[in-house]
Image (tube, rainbow, N blue to C red):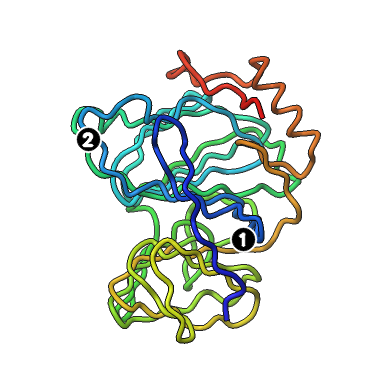
């Protein structure tokens, strides 16, 4: 049986753009190295898309941001000088390391509006990589391996699973996959990771006679995992990996050391983390609490 079921909590990113936050959760801070998991939608954005729905420049340390869209378009800009449009099925993997700032804007949808939906996850870095230089990698949908079986199709976003390996650069053992199931079809999570979870993005599934609707994350421990069966056409995000140990998280900062987070607060307040060169006219200030 699952160890835990996590319900999403609604969180406003600012300007009225709401996400369903799954991780971190008070009873389960991480799944393997995954320390943050937000469902960004689905939302129907008006035309023109208001700029207050954009995510203005903000900082990160000690993690990789992992952005994956089901629908819509987001433009990423960071202080490495990179500007990258993210489309459905693409993987946007930004490693903050010792410090980076980026923005996420709806520039490509500004005039037309439309549907936007996807997942942003954060993957904590091992202690040996927490102070790495920041880096950015983008993988188009065509670069990520696909797999299929009877009633099952999927894309391996990152890591190793289902006999495949993603080209995405990672820093610790993990897997992350986008799975579509036809009604009645089943899939089993990879057995070689001690921490695993299934997020029901659409539809509903059954595990050992218990039904789970869209929006829930079903958490499994080590060992064999039971089959996940679709009660209707469903879409799942499967994730997991090796645990990294305790991590502290405050706002956009993750670290194995509390004092490093305090340093990151000061660095952002005092301008030592530079704004994106192509988006430097505004930023999100350090929260007061």
The residue at which mark 1 appears reads as: 31
> Where's residue 209, x and y in %?
45, 86
Residue matched to label 2: 113
Q: Which residue, as the protein is rendered here, is positioned at the far bottom?
A: 209
Residue located 37% across and 53% down the image: 143
For the point 62% across and 74% down, which residue is it?
Answer: 3
Instruction: Quadrant for the N terminus, please.
Output: bottom right
Q: Is residue 17 left or right of residue 2?
A: left
Name the residue at 51% across, 49% down: 121
Q: What x and y, as percent, mark residue 134?
A: 60, 33
Which one is in front, 25 or 133?
Answer: 25
Pick the front one: 161 or 209 = 209
Q: Quadrant of residue 220?
A: bottom right
Q: x, y percentage for residue 22? A: 52, 55
Tell me which corner region of the image, top left, top right, bottom left or bottom right, holds residue 25: bottom right
Viewer-side residue, 54 vs 88: 54
């Amino acid at each position: 049986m699952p160890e835990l079921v996590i319900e999403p909590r609604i969180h406003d990113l600012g300007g009225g753009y709401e996400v369903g936050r799954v991780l971190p959760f008070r009873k389960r801070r991480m799944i393997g190295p995954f320390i943050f998991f937000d469902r960004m939608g689905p939302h129907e954005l008006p035309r023109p898309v208001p700029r207050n729905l954009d995510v203005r420049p903000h900082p990160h340390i000690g993690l990789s941001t992992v952005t994956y869209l089901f629908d819509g378009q987001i433009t990423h800009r960071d202080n490495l000088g990179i500007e990258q449009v993210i489309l459905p099925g693409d993987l946007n993997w930004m490693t903050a390391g010792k410090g980076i700032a980026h923005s996420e804007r709806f520039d490509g949808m500004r005039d037309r509006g439309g549907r936007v939906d996807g997942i942003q996850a954060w993957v904590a870095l091992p202690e040996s990589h927490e102070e790495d230089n920041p880096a950015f990698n983008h993988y188009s949908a065509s670069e990520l391996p696909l797999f299929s079986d009877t009633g099952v199709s999927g894309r391996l976003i990152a890591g190793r699973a289902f006999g495949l390996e993603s080209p995405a650069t990672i820093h610790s053992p993990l897997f992350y996959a986008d799975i579509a199931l036809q009604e009645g079809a089943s899939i089993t999570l990879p057995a070689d990771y001690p921490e695993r979870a299934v997020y029901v993005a659409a539809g509903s599934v059954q595990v050992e006679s218990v039904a789970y609707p869209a929006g829930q994350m079903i958490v499994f421990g080590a060992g064999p995992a039971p089959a996940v069966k679709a009660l209707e056409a469903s879409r799942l995000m499967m994730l997991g990996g090796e645990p990294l140990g305790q991590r502290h998280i405050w706002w956009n900062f993750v670290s194995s050391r509390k004092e490093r987070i305090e340093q990151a607060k000061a660095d952002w307040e005092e301008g030592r983390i530079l704004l994106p060169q192509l988006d430097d006219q505004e930023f999100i200030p350090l929260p007061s609490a």
